[in-house]
C-alpha cells in the first residue's frame, strides 16, 4: 500500500533573541496535527532552501533589532533580495505569508518584516494570508494568537489552489505563470492589535481543562480584584483574596481553559564530575573578541543625583585592529549575578554539582522540528559556567515555558495557576504578573515551590545571555588606543516577588567592578579589572561624510555619549584642516539639575568656545520650578523637545532646505517619541501641511538616512 505524502510548506525565520525562532518552530511542530509537513530553516541557511524554485507556500517569521535592522541571521537574506539587479518577476511564482515581530517603543516598528514584504511584492511574490505585526510593547500574543489561528486554513487553501492549477497546467500545457486566479480567495487586511479578534479554541490548544482538578477555595472565601473585608449574612467577617501571581479570581478561576499544547522535549542533559574551572575561563576568552583592561572610571553625576552616571575608559592598545568610528557601539559581555546563580542552583538541587561538566545531546525520539543543541552553549563547560555566562536567567518566561513547567508541578492549585497564566483566558494575568513585572525564572520558581523542573528544561527554554551594547563616547583621533563609554546604573524597583529590587545586570556588574577605584581613586589602577568586548560597527549613525553639511544632535542624559565622539572628531579634523569648510552643529541636551547630572558640561562648553559646536541648547527638567505641574515656557524649557520648538525655524531650515542631518540618542519609550512628534509639528508649521504630509516628509528623511536614531527601551 503506497504511503500517503502529506502536503508541504516552508517556514523561514530570522531571529535575534530566539522569539521568532520559537514561533517558527511551533508552527513547524503543529503542522503534523493539520496533516501537513513543514520544512523549517533559518534565513541564513540558504543551502537548505531555494526561493527561486520554491513551489510550496512560504511562511516568514522575522523580528527587528536595533534601529529597524534585520536580525544577524537574516541580514544576508535581506541584502540579497534588495539587489536592484533582480527582475520584477523574480518571485512571481512565490506565495507567502509573513509574521513580523517588533516593539512600538522604537520608531522603526517591524521594519525588517516590512522591508522583506515590500521587496517580495516588488519582485512579484503574492500573499496568501494577511501580514501580522506583533508588538512586544503591549504583548506579542495579542496579534500572534489570532494570526496563528487563521494560518492553517489559509495554508491548506493555498495548497489546494496550487495543486489544482498545476493539474490544469499539465493538461493544457499552457502558461508558465501562476495566474492571479490561483491565489486563495482571502481578504488581505493587515492584522494588528486594533483588530481585537476573539480567538476560539483550535487545534493548537488542548481540549478545555476542567477546573475540577484544582482544589476549590473554602466556601467562606470570596474572591475580588482587591483585598477587602465583608460580612456574611451571619455577621461573620469574610476575608476577600486579591488576585496575584499565585492566585486568581473569578471569572478566570472558574473558567475552563485553553492552554497551549505541551512543547516536545528535545534535549538529554547529564552532569559528569570534573573540575572545569580552567576550561570555563579559557572558553570565555574565546567567546568574546577582545579582553581589555579598564584604564579609568569616573563618576559623572554628583551629589544626590537620581541616577548614578559613570564613564569608563578601556585600554585597547593591545589590539591595533580594534578600530571604531564616532557613532559606533560595542558589546560588553557580562555574567549573571553570582547570588542569583547560586539561588537557582539551590532551587534546582544542584548546588553540590556546580563544578560538574554539562553534557548535552539531542533526544533520539524528539518530535521537535529543527531540534539542535543550543549553539550558544560551548562543550565541556561546568554547570556554574553555563548558568553564569550562557543563559539569560532573568529573561521573562514565555508561555510555552510555563506550559512545560506544569508537568513538573506537584501541587494541584499551583498547576492550575500555571495553566491559567499560559492560557488564552489568562493573557491579562500573564502580562500583569509575569511580563510587566519582568519576572525571572528564579522568582517564578520561588512563587511555585512544588515546581521542580529538570535542568534540561531550562536549557531548552532560557535564551542566550546577550551582551549589552554601549555607544562609544570618544574619538580615536582625540583618544588613540582608548575606548570610552557612559552609562547610568539601572535600578529596578521592588515588587511583590522581588522585595529588595535589583540593579541592571550589566550596569550593576560594571559598577561593582569599578567601585573600589571610585571610592579610592589613588588605587584605581590596581583595582580595575579586564572585561570582554566586541565591536558593533554602525555604518549609518555617524557624522555626515561631507563635513560641510550641517547637523543637529539630540541627546539628553547619557544619550549625549555618541555626540561627544562626534564633536571630538570634528574638533580634531578642524585642527588638521583649518581651511576646510565645516557645517553648522547643534546639540540639544537635557538633564534634571545643572549641578548634579549635567554630563560633560566642561567639555561641551569648551566645544562652544572653540567653535566646534555652534549652538548648545540645554534644559533642566527639575530646576528652578516651584510648581512641577507648571508648563514649560520660552524662558524655561523643561525637555529637549521644548528647546526644539523654540528653534523651529533654524532646525527645519537645516533639514528641509540645507540637506542637513538630525541624530537622536537616548530613551525610546518617551524622549524619542516626543521628539518625533515635535519634529512633525515643526514640519507642519514650517511647510503649512497636514499631519499626513508631515509624516511623509519625516519618513523621507529616514529613507535618505538623514534622520537617524540610536535609542533603547
Image (cartoon, helix red, strand yellow):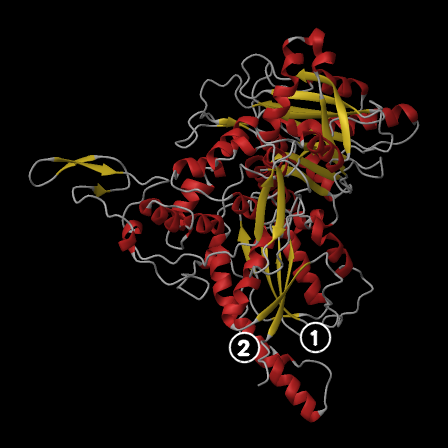
Above or below, comparing residue 517 to residue 75 in the picture: above
Res. 613 visible in picture: no
**Residue 137 percent location from the top left of the image:** 52, 45
Above or below, comparing residue 378 to residue 74 in the picture: above
Circle nearer the viewer, 2 or 1: 1
**Could you say which is closer to the camera, residue 701 or residue 246?**
246
Q: Which residue is mark 1?
A: 93
Residue appearing at x 22%, y 38% in the figure: 240
Residue 653: image quadrant is top right
Q: Residue furthest left?
A: 234
Q: CA distance from mark 2 to mark 1?
A: 17 Å
Tell me the crowding category of disc 1: few under 14, some 14 to 19, or many 20 or more residues within 10 angstroms, Cα based: many
Residue 236: image quadrant is top left
Tell me the crowding category of disc 2: few under 14, some 14 to 19, or many 20 or more residues within 10 angstroms, Cα based: few
Name which of mark 2 and mark 1 comes first in the sequence. 1
Res. 350 visible in picture: yes
Amino acid at each position: 500500500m503506497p504511503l500517503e505524502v502529506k502536503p508541504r510548506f516552508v517556514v523561514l525565520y530570522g531571529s535575534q533573541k530566539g522569539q521568532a525562532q520559537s514561533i517558527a518552530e511551533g508552527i513547524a511542530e503543529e503542522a503534523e496535527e493539520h496533516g501537513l509537513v513543514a520544512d523549517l530553516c533559518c534565513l541564513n541557511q540558504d543551502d537548505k532552501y531555494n526561493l527561486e524554485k520554491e513551489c510550496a507556500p512560504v511562511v516568514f517569521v522575522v523580528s527587528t533589532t536595533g534601529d529597524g535592522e534585520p536580525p544577524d541571521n537574516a541580514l544576508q537574506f535581506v541584502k540579497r533580495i534588495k539587489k536592484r539587479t533582480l527582475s520584477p518577476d523574480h518571485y512571481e511564482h512565490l506565495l507567502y505569508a509573513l509574521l513580523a515581530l517588533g516593539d512600538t517603543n522604537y520608531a522603526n516598528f517591524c521594519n525588517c518584516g516590512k522591508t522583506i514584504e515590500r521587496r517580495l511584492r516588488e519582485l512579484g511574490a503574492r500573499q496568501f494570508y494577511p501580514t501580522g505585526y506583533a508588538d512586544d510593547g503591549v504583548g506579542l500574543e495579542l496579534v500572534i494568537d489570532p494570526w496563528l489561528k487563521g494560518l492553517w486554513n489559509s495554508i491548506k487553501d493555498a495548497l489546494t489552489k496550487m495543486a489544482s492549477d498545476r493539474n490544469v497546467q499539465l493538461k493544457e500545457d499552457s502558461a508558465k505563470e501562476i495566474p492571479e486566479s490561483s491565489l486563495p480567495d482571502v481578504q488581505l487586511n493587515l492584522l494588528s492589535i486594533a483588530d481585537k479578534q476573539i480567538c476560539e479554541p483550535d487545534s493548537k490548544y488542548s481540549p478545555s481543562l476542567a477546573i475540577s482538578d484544582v482544589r476549590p477555595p473554602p466556601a467562606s472565601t470570596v474572591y475580588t480584584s482587591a483585598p477587602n473585608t465583608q460580612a456574611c449574612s451571619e455577621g461573620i467577617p469574610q476575608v476577600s483574596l486579591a488576585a496575584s501571581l499565585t492566585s486568581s479570581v473569578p471569572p478566570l478561576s472558574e473558567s475552563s481553559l485553553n492552554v497551549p499544547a505541551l512543547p516536545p522535549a528535545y534535549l538529554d542533559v547529564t552532569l559528569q564530575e570534573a573540575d572545569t574551572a580552567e576550561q570555563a575561563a579559557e572558553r570565555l576568552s574565546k567567546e568574546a573578541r577582545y579582553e581589555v583592561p579598564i584604564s579609568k572610571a569616573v563618576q559623572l553625576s554628583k551629589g544626590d543625583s537620581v541616577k548614578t552616571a559613570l564613564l569608563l575608559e578601556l585600554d585597547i592598545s593591545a589590539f591595533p585592529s580594534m578600530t571604531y568610528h564616532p557613532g559606533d557601539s560595542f558589546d560588553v559581555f557580562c555574567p549573571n549575578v553570582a547570588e542569583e546563580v547560586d539561588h537557582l542552583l539551590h532551587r534546582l538541587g544542584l548546588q553540590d554539582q556546580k563544578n560538574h561538566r554539562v553534557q548535552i545531546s539531542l533526544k533520539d525520539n524528539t518530535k521537535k522540528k529543527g531540534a539542535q543543541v543550543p549553539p550558544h552553549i560551548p562543550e565541556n563547560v561546568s554547570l556554574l559556567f553555563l548558568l553564569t555566562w550562557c543563559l539569560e536567567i532573568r529573561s521573562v518566561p514565555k508561555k510555552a515555558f510555563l506550559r512545560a513547567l506544569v508537568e513538573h508541578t506537584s501541587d494541584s492549585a499551583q498547576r492550575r495557576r500555571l495553566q491559567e497564566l499560559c492560557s488564552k483566558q489568562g493573557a491579562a494575568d500573564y502580562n500583569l504578573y509575569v511580563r510587566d513585572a519582568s519576572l525571572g525564572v528564579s522568582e517564578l520558581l520561588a512563587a511555585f515551590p512544588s515546581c521542580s523542573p529538570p535542568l534540561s528544561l531550562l536549557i531548552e527554554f532560557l535564551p542566550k545571555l546577550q551582551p549589552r551594547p554601549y555607544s562609544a563616547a570618544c574619538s580615536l583621533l582625540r583618544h588613540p588606543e582608548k575606548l570610552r563609554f557612559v552609562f547610568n546604573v539601572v535600578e529596578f524597583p521592588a515588587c511583590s516577588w522581588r522585595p529588595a529590587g535589583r540593579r541592571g545586570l550589566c550596569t550593576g556588574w560594571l559598577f561593582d567592578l569599578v567601585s573600589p577605584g571610585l571610592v579610592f581613586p589613588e588605587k584605581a589602577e590596581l583595582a580595575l579589572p579586564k572585561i570582554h568586548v566586541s565591536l558593533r560597527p554602525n555604518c549609518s549613525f555617524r557624522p555626515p561624510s561631507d563635513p560641510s553639511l550641517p547637523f543637529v544632535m539630540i541627546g539628553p542624559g547619557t544619550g549625549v555619549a555618541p555626540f561627544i565622539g562626534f564633536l571630538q572628531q570634528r574638533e580634531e579634523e578642524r585642527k588638521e584642516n583649518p581651511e576646510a569648510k565645516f557645517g553648522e552643529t547643534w546639540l540639544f541636551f537635557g538633564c534634571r539639575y545643572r549641578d548634579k547630572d549635567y554630563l560633560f558640561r566642561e567639555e561641551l562648553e569648551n566645544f562652544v568656545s572653540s567653535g566646534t559646536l555652534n549652538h548648545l541648547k540645554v534644559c533642566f527638567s527639575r530646576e528652578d520650578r516651584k510648581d512641577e505641574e507648571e508648563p514649560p515656557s520660552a524662558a524655561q524649557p523643561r525637555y529637549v523637545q521644548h528647546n526644539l520648538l523654540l528653534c523651529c525655524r533654524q532646525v527645519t531650515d537645516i533639514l528641509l532646505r540645507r540637506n542637513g542631518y538630525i541624530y537622536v540618542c537616548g530613551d525610546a519609550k518617551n524622549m524619542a517619541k516626543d521628539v518625533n512628534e515635535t519634529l512633525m509639528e515643526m514640519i507642519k508649521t514650517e511647510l503649512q501641511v497636514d499631519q499626513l504630509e508631515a509624516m511623509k516628509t519625516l519618513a523621507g528623511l529616514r529613507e535618505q538616512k538623514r534622520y537617524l536614531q540610536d535609542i533603547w527601551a
